[in-house]
Image (cartoon, grey):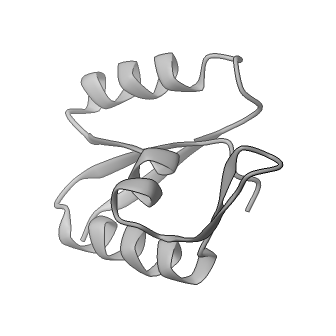
């Protein structure tokens, strides 16, 4: 069973750079949560006004949990989602 390290914060503060570096140092799997959700269609709809996807939180939680459980090491999750 893997373990997750979540790096979260506002856009532009260096989350991705730190996450990628940490993944490299720990030989860990890197997951950008926004890309992960969109690639797997884990959203309810696209909000045109905000130019953003509204994420299916339960579906995303389930899918990322499966990735963490199936991975043998650390999973570094890069996200700007608050919860």
Q: Is residue 52 left or right of residue 70?
A: right
Q: Say if 47 sits above or below 65 in the image.
A: above
x 46%, y 59%: residue: 37
| Residue in the picture at 62% in, 75% down | 57
Q: Give the side of residue 27 with respect to residue 17, left or right.
A: left
Residue 8 x %, y %: 66, 40
Residue farthest front in this picture:
48
Count how many numbered circles sit on residues in the image: 0
Percent coordinates x, y for residue 12 in the rendering: 70, 17
Q: Nearer the viewer, residue 7 or 48?
A: 48
Could you say which quadrant of the image residue 13 lies in? top right
Residue 7, horizontal then vertical, whole percent: 58, 39
Task: Decide which of 47, 69 is in the foreground and name it.
Answer: 47
**Image point 50% across, 24% down: which residue?**
16
Can you give x and y, in whole percent of width and height, for residue 29 in the image? 25, 43
For this view, does 82 lie left or right of residue 80?
right
Q: In this view, does 36 lie above or below 80?
A: below
Locate the N terminus by quadrant: bottom left
- Looking at the rendered image, the quarter that the C terminus falls into is bottom right
Q: Taking 47 as reference, is 12 above or below it? A: above
Residue drawn at the location 16% of the way across and 60% of the way down: 72
């Amino acid at each position: 069973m893997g373990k997750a390290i979540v790096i979260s914060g506002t856009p532009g503060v260096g989350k991705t750079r730190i996450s990628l570096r940490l993944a490299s140092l720990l030989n860990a799997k890197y997951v950008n949560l926004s890309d992960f959700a969109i690639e797997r269609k884990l959203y309810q709809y696209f909000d045109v006004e905000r130019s953003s996807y509204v994420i299916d939180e339960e579906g995303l939680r389930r899918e990322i949990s499966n990735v963490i459980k199936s991975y043998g090491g650390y999973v570094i999750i890069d996200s700007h989602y608050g919860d």
